[in-house]
Amino acid sequence: MSLAKQVIKHATKGIKYLSVTDNKVLQPQFIAMYAQTTDMIIAEVKGTITHMVKNNRHDVAATMIAHSHSANSDYHAANIRNISTPERELTSTYIENKRGLFQVGLMTVSSDEMDKFLAENPDMALTDVIQSTPETPRIYVAASLTSAVA
């Protein structure tokens, strides 16, 4: 298993993912489909799972992993706004692009699930598609149109 094959490959240039985990802002850089791959990445990079992508049956389809020491100095957890509501729980993952920082509402391997989510949430947009490889699934990512910086 090669660590290089597990690096997140964005369809959208100029973005990066950030996750708020234990009051730290980490930058996920790896993705894995299988438990043994996840374990290998965590051991090799002293990683932390930042997000579990689920399929339409709510099974874990992939995990996003960050170096435990990949804290982002541009943002502090206290300055990042969580726009979840009791009616709509969003992820603790964010996308940074040239316009700012935006909270991810859904990450899914199902294009049908993404279409349904976007139809029900007009304040969200398809922001990225993490490209599939032989060792990682294609993941559709929708994020808020509202800045998450407080």
Image (spheres, rainbow, N blue to C red):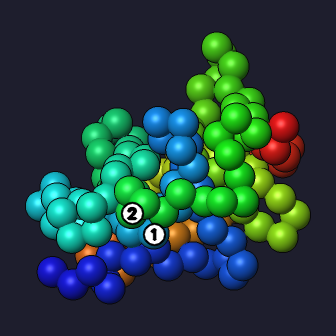
Q: Earlier in the sequence, mark 1 or mark 2?
A: 1
Disc 2 residue type (three-letter)? His
The residue drawn where x is 68% and y is 26% is 84
Q: Residue at x 72, y 60 (%)?
A: 74
Quarter of the figure with the N terminus = bottom left
* Residue 92 rendering spot, x and y as whole percentages: 56, 40
Quadrant where the image shows the C terminus: top right
Residue found 33% across the figure and 38% down from its top = 57
- Residue 110 in view of the camera: no
Could you tell me how many numbered marks the image carries?
2
Assign a secondary structure to mark 1.
Answer: strand
79 vs 36, left or right, is right
Q: Amino acid at mark 1?
A: Gln
Badge 2 marks a residue whose secondary structure is strand
Point out which mark residue 67 bears.
Answer: 2
**133 w.r.t. 94: above or below:** below
Q: Position of residue 148 (x, y in %)?
A: 78, 43
Residues at discs 1 and 2 in contact (Cβ within 8 Å): yes
Circle 1 residue: 29
